[in-house]
């Protein structure tokens, strides 16, 4: 069921089940966020997507909510850039800048909100982790739950069992892919991938010999995704090339005179041609 709501004075259409953040992103209203990712359920840990919410029937009452968790509803009136919202975001970024003073992502967001230097004392031995929990949630929901949030208070951190290499990690790098600040890293050398203190051997493509997936991840996917044993015989690049060659064979079989265009073979359009074509109704 669709309904209408107001965002920054603009009437927009929303669907039942959408969050305010999803509606804002769909209609092009910028709302900053660090802990949100479509691969996992929203969590609201970074607090950057705070918005001001009210309704006419609420007789002037307004509340601050996280856009990623707050459900869209008929006749909602949303402000994403009010002074109250900007004040909250500045405070959040002030704290994050003290926690991760070397993070370029935090520096850029803070500068965009008028925070050039944190008013808090930077922590000792800072890293790039903002404790958003995205890596943990991705690993729990899609893979093996090899990492977790450990400790409490100022000692809280993302860690592994007993502080050593996580035995359940399959080296899929999903945690590194979703990390918003680049805190989680990995490297590959000599056909081995290293992440979270683990060193995992990789599968080499039988066509080009390029290592493209760890043996542990391959075995996990074969066991849990009902894939054919030959699915990981070749890397994605070689698969695409073979698919393209097969497609070319089909095209030539049905259209013998077809000659594919080569890159650079088509002369550039005459000056003004593109502009004139766009102007034509």
Image: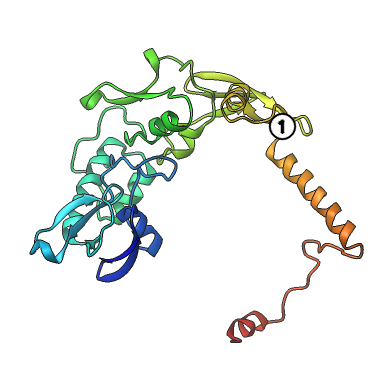
Q: Residue furthest right?
A: 256
Q: Position of residue 187 (x, y in %)?
A: 56, 28
Tell me the residue at 22%/62% (across/down). 76
Above or below residue 145? Residue 63 is: below
Which quarter of the picture shows residue 235?
A: top right
Quadrant of the snapshot with the N terminus: bottom left
Density class for disc 1 (Cα within 10 Å; few <14, some 14-19, many ≥20) is some
Query: Coloured how?
Result: rainbow
Q: Secondary structure at mark 1?
A: loop
Q: From the image, tell me which residue sits under label 1.
A: 210
Above or below residue 140? Residue 244 is: below
Tell me the residue at 39%/30% (across/down). 136
Q: Position of residue 125 (x, y in %)?
A: 31, 27
Q: Position of residue 153 (x, y in %)?
A: 21, 26
Determine whether, in the image, residue 218 is placed left or right of residue 178: right
Determine whether, in the image, residue 256 is placed left or right of residue 68: right
């Amino acid at each position: 069921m669709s309904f209408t709501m107001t965002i920054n004075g603009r009437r927009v259409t929303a669907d039942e089940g959408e969050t305010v953040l999803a509606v804002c992103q769909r209609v092009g209203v910028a709302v900053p966020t660090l802990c949100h990712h479509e691969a996992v359920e929203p969590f609201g840990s970074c607090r950057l997507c705070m918005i001001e919410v009210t309704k006419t029937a609420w007789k002037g009452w307004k509340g601050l909510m996280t856009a990623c968790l707050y459900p869209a509803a008929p006749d909602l009136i949303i402000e994403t850039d009010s002074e109250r919202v900007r004040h909250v975001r500045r405070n959040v970024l002030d704290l994050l800048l003290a926690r991760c003073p070397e993070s370029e992502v935090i520096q850029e967001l803070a500068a965009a909100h008028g925070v050039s230097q944190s008013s808090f004392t930077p922590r000792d031995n800072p890293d790039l982790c903002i404790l958003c929990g995205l890596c943990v949630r991705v690993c729990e929901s899609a893979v093996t739950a090899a990492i977790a949030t450990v400790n409490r208070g100022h000692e809280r951190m993302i860690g592994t069992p007993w502080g050593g290499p996580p035995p359940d990690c399959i080296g899929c790098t999903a945690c590194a892919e979703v990390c918003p600040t680049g805190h989680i890293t990995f490297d590959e050398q000599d056909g081995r991938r290293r992440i979270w203190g683990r060193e995992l051997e990789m599968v080499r493509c039988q066509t080009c010999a390029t290592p493209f997936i760890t043996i542990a991840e391959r075995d996990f996917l074969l066991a849990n995704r009902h894939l054919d044993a030959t699915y990981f015989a070749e890397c994605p690049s070689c698969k695409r090339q073979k698919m393209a060659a097969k497609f070319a064979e089909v095209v030539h079989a049905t259209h013998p005179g077809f000659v594919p265009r080569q890159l650079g073979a088509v002369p550039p359009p005459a000056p003004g041609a593109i502009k004139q074509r766009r102007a034509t109704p």
